[in-house]
Amino acid sequence: MLVLLAGSVRASELRRPGRDGKANDVTLDRASVSTVESRNRIRFGERTPNSQNLAVPDKSSDESEFLAEPSVDGVFEGRFCSGCTSTRCVSWSAGIGLSLLRPHYGDNLAATTMNGDGANFETFTRTPFDYDATLSPRIWLHIAGSNGLGARVRYWQFDQSADAITAAAPANGFGRVFPPEFGNIDISVNVPGQSITATSAIDAHCIDIEGTQETAFGLWMFEVAGGLRYSSIGQQCRAQSRNAAGVLLGDIAFEHGFDGVGPTLGIEVRRSAGPQFGFFGNLRGSLLYGDGTSSLVAGEDLDLQTPFTTRDSTSRDDLLPIGEMQVGIDWRTPLTRFVQRDGEFFCRAALEGQLWQDAGNATSEEGNLGFFGVSLAAGITW
């Protein structure tokens, strides 16, 4: 009957009895016809271009995809994905970063030079290994659901060799040059023209597999992460003494390292400063359990017929705590500015610091290792 009524309404003219019993003509405008027709269709489960404005909102739509992103005034809002459910709508994020980092040690001795006159004074000059800042890559892949729950894989590497250090014996014949100390091994030189050259290197890797949870509050975005980290680090030192003719007199090769796995926890806070810019900071802590190893091979009096060789190696269970921090700014823009695809492109710049507690240095398994520098990163979210 309602369909027939709608059909009658489309005729734009209805007849109804008047007071005198005669039928009177009633003319409806086009808007009234559209309203009546839409209501009738909604009652029968039909959808019209205007029906969604009249229908009761479906509460299940609140469970559709939520991607936190700044609105025009910079407030993080939810962007809903029509036609998706909370188990189907996901966002992907991938990026690459380059950190310009320099290693820092409390003590990383390469050689010690003693000057004197043979009677009244002696002065000692300690020369450490000198590392320049070098680029270290970081890559990641992240997937997150509509409820902010996700998973991420990250990889970071640092690989650098220090500048070679060469120290020559004093010309007056009353001084001496000592290499880094390794027990009773002695390849020091004191004859003018003799010298010691020392080199060192460091190589570190980290792989994180973790779960993430994102939450937005107005201008603030919070992300917590927790999972598993695998890390390895190796450091090497090589010291050689030679005479004026370049003949090898003594040689020390020492290396030590750590391989371990353990929990990692992190938190990041981002504050919008407008529709595209924002500030962020993050902290991460890892506690790794694994194996620590060291190896030493040394040769003394190598210019003689009967040189003396020393070998030593160790292996032990070890613990390595690692702390990391970044503070910086980021810039974001719709991906449609570059390609015909929904998503977001972002860039980041930050100060970065890391502390590897009891990671040792090139010549010892004792002491802390730190990294400090700047980090640049870029990526996309789709």
Image: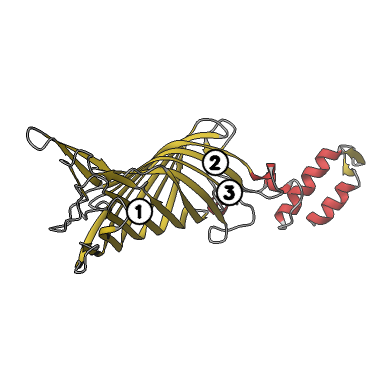
Kindly identify the amino acid type of the residue bearing the numbered disc 3.
Ile
Q: Which of marks 1 and 3 is in front?
A: 1
- Residue in front for this viewpoint, 278 or 232: 232
C-alpha distance separating marks 2 and 3: 9 Å
- The residue pinned by badge 2 equals 347
Toward the left, the furthest residue is: 119
Percent position (x, y) of residue 22? 92, 41
Percent position (x, y) of residue 253? 27, 60
Specify the label residue 101 is tagged with. Answer: none
Q: Is residue 209 above or below residue 174?
A: below
- Residue in front for this viewpoint, 101 or 11: 101
Name the side, left or right, on which 87 lies relative to 50: left
Kindly identify the amino acid type of the residue bearing the numbered disc 1.
Ala
Kindly identify the amino acid type of the residue bearing the numbered disc 2.
Cys
Name the side, left or right, on which 148 lies relative to 125: right
- The residue pinned by badge 3 equals 380
Q: Residue at x 28, y 44 (%)?
A: 167
C-alpha distance separating marks 2 and 1: 31 Å
Q: Nearer the viewer, mark 2 or mark 1?
A: 1
Crowd band around label 3 with a 10 angstrom C-alpha radius: few (<14), some (14–19), many (20+) = some
Name the side, left or right, on which 27 lies relative to 242: right
Q: Residue at x 57, y 61 (%)?
A: 88
- The residue pinned by badge 1 equals 201
Give the mark nearest the N terminus, 1 or 3.
1
